[in-house]
């Protein structure tokens, strides 16, 4: 790989005079922890390079009194960071992959998808309900979640509960749970709680039969300028092949459905014995109407460097020249095929009604 070789060689020659790699991130504690973990991985590969972290607030961080699904902005947590990338104020940006739209603005690409952590959702209970599960919470208990996807699936599964929007970063949501008497429990991504070191607060992990997860949940994505070959080569070493292929399938499924955070869409993926399994579902807002299916595809993964053109086409916003193109295309086709199957069975109607109801509220 010429690019990271050039940068690393320059670092060895120049020592402290080597230009610093500037890494953009959101300001929240979780975002900083995630960014620090990516920088630590890069430092392990390139001990001669220096990194500077540039933290900034995004639209999604600033608008805290409105449900995410109501704001109607696809790049809530990414736009300001991409603006800094475009203006060359940062060289790469670390995101939670689930925050990145399946179609990125022109000029950007996801240059690395790191190994996925636990993708499931977790339940954190109010101190007085520790030891309970969602099933054993009292009738009409209020459960907080910022996600239509979670609310739709859980309303269907636990009709005795009420679900209400809760916004803010992880610290804010946990404080609202503990200090206000409004919520009996809140639903959060297990990966975020793990990264914050708050595993002890997890009262229940929701498995796919209870609540399938969001596209890309638990994985970190590194966004770079699409034509910055040095940076693409630099971060490309972080690609985790299994996570990458699972997330390509998930993102292709969501993109083909034309879903986003304003409709309840969820997935579950697994790789086993060369087979990639994808389960995808769509729900009405109240969970009463739903549709889900599972498909699988054979995927062959042997690490290789593709010697194709510098402007390799992206798949669902992702560039990965060190993973076989054939495997990536198979994963993308799996996502598209599953979405097509659901659309042919009437999923579009469920999603259209969900969108209209969400817009009307």
Image: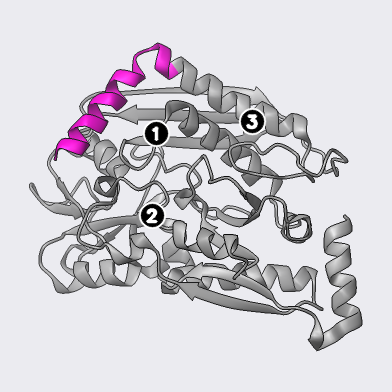
Which residue is label 2 attached to? 76
Q: Nearer the viewer, mark 2 or mark 1?
A: 2
For the C terminus, the image quarter is top left
Where disc 1 sits, the SS reads loop
Q: Compute the Cα span from label 1 to label 3.
A: 18 Å
State the image coordinates of residue 58 (x, y, percent, origin top left): 40, 64
Q: Closer to the camera, 110 or 205?
A: 110
In the rendered image of this protein, does residue 283 appear above or below residue 57?
A: above
Relative image position of residue 348 (x, y in whole percent): 34, 20
Ranked by sequence position, the earlier of labels 2 and 3 is: 2
Q: How many circles with numbers are drawn on the protein?
A: 3
Percent x, y of residue 7 = 83, 69
Chief SS of the magenta region? helix
Residues rendered magenta in the picture = 342-361
Q: Position of residue 177 (x, y in %)?
A: 20, 67
Q: Is residue 355 magenta?
A: yes
Which mark is on residue 295?
Answer: none
- 222 displayed left or right of 49: left
Q: Which residue is mark 3?
A: 331
SS at badge 3: helix
Against 207, is 51 above or below? below
Position of 241 compared to 5: left or right? left
| Circle 1 residue | 259
**What is the quadrant of residue 228 in the picture?**
bottom right
**Quadrant of the snapshot with the N terminus:** bottom right
Q: Dot 2: within a 10 Å radius of its alpha carbon, few (fewer than 14), some, or many (20 or more) residues?
A: some
């Amino acid at each position: 790989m010429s690019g990271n070789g050039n940068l690393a060689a320059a670092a060895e020659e120049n020592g402290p005079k080597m230009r610093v790699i500037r890494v953009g991130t959101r300001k929240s504690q979780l975002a900083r922890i995630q960014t620090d973990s990516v920088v630590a991985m890069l430092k392990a590969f390139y001990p001669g390079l220096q990194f500077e972290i540039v933290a900034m607030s995004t639209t999604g961080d600033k608008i805290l009194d409105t449900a995410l699904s109501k704001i109607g902005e696809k790049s809530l947590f990414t736009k300001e960071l991409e603006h800094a990338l475009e203006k060359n104020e940062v060289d790469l940006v670390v995101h939670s992959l689930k925050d990145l739209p399946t179609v990125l603005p022109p000029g950007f690409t996801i240059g690395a998808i790191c190994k996925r952590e636990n993708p499931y959702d977790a339940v954190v209970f109010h101190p007085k309900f520790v030891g309970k599960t969602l099933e054993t919470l009292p009738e009409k208990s209020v459960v907080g979640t910022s996600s239509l996807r979670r609310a739709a699936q859980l309303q269907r599964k636990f009709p005795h509960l009420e679900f209400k929007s809760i916004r803010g970063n992880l610290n804010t949501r946990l404080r609202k749970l503990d200090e206000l008497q409004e919520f009996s429990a809140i639903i959060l991504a297990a990966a975020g709680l793990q990264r914050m070191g708050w595993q002890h607060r997890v009262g229940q992990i929701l498995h796919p039969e209870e609540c399938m997860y969001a596209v890309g949940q638990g994985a970190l994505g590194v966004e770079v300028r699409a034509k910055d070959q040095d940076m693409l080569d630099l971060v490309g070493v972080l690609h985790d092949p299994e996570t990458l292929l699972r997330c390509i399938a998930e993102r292709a499924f969501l993109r083909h459905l034309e879903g986003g955070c304003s409709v309840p869409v969820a997935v579950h993926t697994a790789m086993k014995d060369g087979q990639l399994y994808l389960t995808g579902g769509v729900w009405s807002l109240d969970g009463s109407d739903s549709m889900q299916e599972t498909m699988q595809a054979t995927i062959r993964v042997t690490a290789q460097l593709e010697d194709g053109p510098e402007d390799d086409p992206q798949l669902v916003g992702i560039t990965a020249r060190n993973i076989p193109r054939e495997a990536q295309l198979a994963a993308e086709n799996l996502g598209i095929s599953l979405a097509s199957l659901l659309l042919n069975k009437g999923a579009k109607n469920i999603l259209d009604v969900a969108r209209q109801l969400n817009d009307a509220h």
